Amino acid sequence: MYKKALSLLLAGAMASTLLACGSGAKTNSETTKAEAAGTEKEEAEGTEKAAEGEVEGGHIVILTAPEDHGWTGAVATFAKEKAEEINKEGKYTAEVITCDDASYQIHQIEDMISKGDKSLKGIVIQPIDDTVQSGIQQIIDAGIPYVAFDRIIDGVSDKAVSNVKGDNEGIGAGSAAYFVENGLKPGDKVYVYEGDTSSVTSLRNKGFTDYLTGEAEYDGKKIADDKKWTEDDLKKVTYSGAMNWSRSDTKTAFESLLGEKSNADYKWIYAEDDELAMGIIEALNGGGIDESVKEQFLSNKPFITGCGGLEDMYSAIRGDSYQDLVSKMGGLMSVTYSPSMIQTAIQDMVDHLEGKEVTKDHVIECVNVTKENVKDFKSFN
């Protein structure tokens, strides 16, 4: 039954076999006719092979979070790219399922398992939240290999083929190292724009302060002894509270911050996402801040960091946009945390099915992206 459904799915797919669930997801039926024309023959041939049992490796399902902001939306895009690559190679079939909430994600898991289809060889999952643990436990109980991406749930992580994630603490450490490299001294005022109230934010905060106190390293190095911060020094770090990963919320918050002229002496701004950093840049470029306060702020040659790999941020770093504004700053930097990491997670599953050794705790190393090396990194929109 599952194979028949799969054949129908592949026959109707455009560039990859994407299923969408939930009100906010997009299906392949929305792909343009122009895009479909170039792949119709390949997809028909792939469907024929699947129907005849010629796909020797079996089927891989990729479950991703909803497309609710740039980073997660890009995860789905990169997952579809990898699924398309797998389908073209012909040994395995792959499909991407995006879901708007955890209950639907669990439902998809239960539905797949209930069919008992032997062609289902592996599941790659980005859990929407920790409640998906119950669904993952069902995957484990069914004996289906799984790879976890981004949100790693401790209660089931030891049963995963691999746990693939970015280095959230490394993001904080990278930002702190960049500031220290550019003159940050113990006790200097620092403002941190936080993403939300999750463990992601906690880890990014921890990496930042741990680097300053000498407990963490970046790029294999720790802060010099004479530049270490004490607990008293850390009291000079101010936290924004949850910005909900929102550019507009951060723009409003930064305008409010500089509504007080005394705050114009902030030189070190650590934003925990490129969207937040862009909110600051847009605030500085707009008319919501008194011009004299703005001039005072920029006269300090401030440094602003973000993370993620958003094209808007990379464009500003390259000097393709906001040239006049960025030229007045001390520096602009983004730590890597690319949504393309989902492709590493999918490849881990393929490698496992091929009998290759896979790293269990697969942490993707962070790199600081500046105007000197930005050309070497791929951004997302």
Image (tube, rainbow, N blue to C red):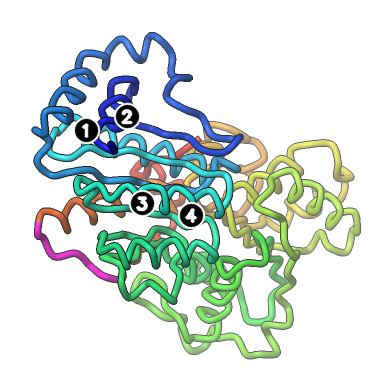
Residue at screen point 13% across, 44% down: 57
Where does the N terminus fall, quadrant-wise? top left
Residue type marked 1: Asn
Question: Disc 2 designates what residue?
Answer: 16
Residues at circles 1 and 2 in contact by the CB criterion of under 8 Å: yes
Q: What stretch is highlighted in magenta?
A: 355-360
SS under mark 4: helix
Tell which circle, 3 or 2, labels the residue nearer the N-terminal end.
2
Classed neighbour count for the residue bearing mark 2: other residues with Cα under 10 Å, few (<14), some (14–19), many (≥20):
many
Instruction: Give how far apart the Cα atoms at labels 1 and 4 are.
Output: 25 Å
Disc marking residue 106? 4
Tell which circle, 1 or 2, labels the residue nearer the N-terminal end.
2
> Could you tell whether 377 is left or right of 205 in the image?
left
Question: Disc 3 designates what residue?
Answer: 114
**x and y percent of residue 352 in the render?**
17, 58
Question: Disc 1 designates what residue?
Answer: 87
Residue at screen point 44% across, 61% down: 135
Q: Nearer the viewer, mark 3 or mark 1?
A: 3
Classed neighbour count for the residue bearing mark 1: other residues with Cα under 10 Å, few (<14), some (14–19), many (≥20):
many
Tell which circle, 4 or 2, labels the residue nearer the N-terminal end.
2
Residue type marked 3: Ser
Instruction: Give how far apart the Cα atoms at labels 4 and 3 are.
Output: 12 Å
Picture quadrant of residue 37: top left
Q: Compared to 86, does 235 lie above or below?
A: below
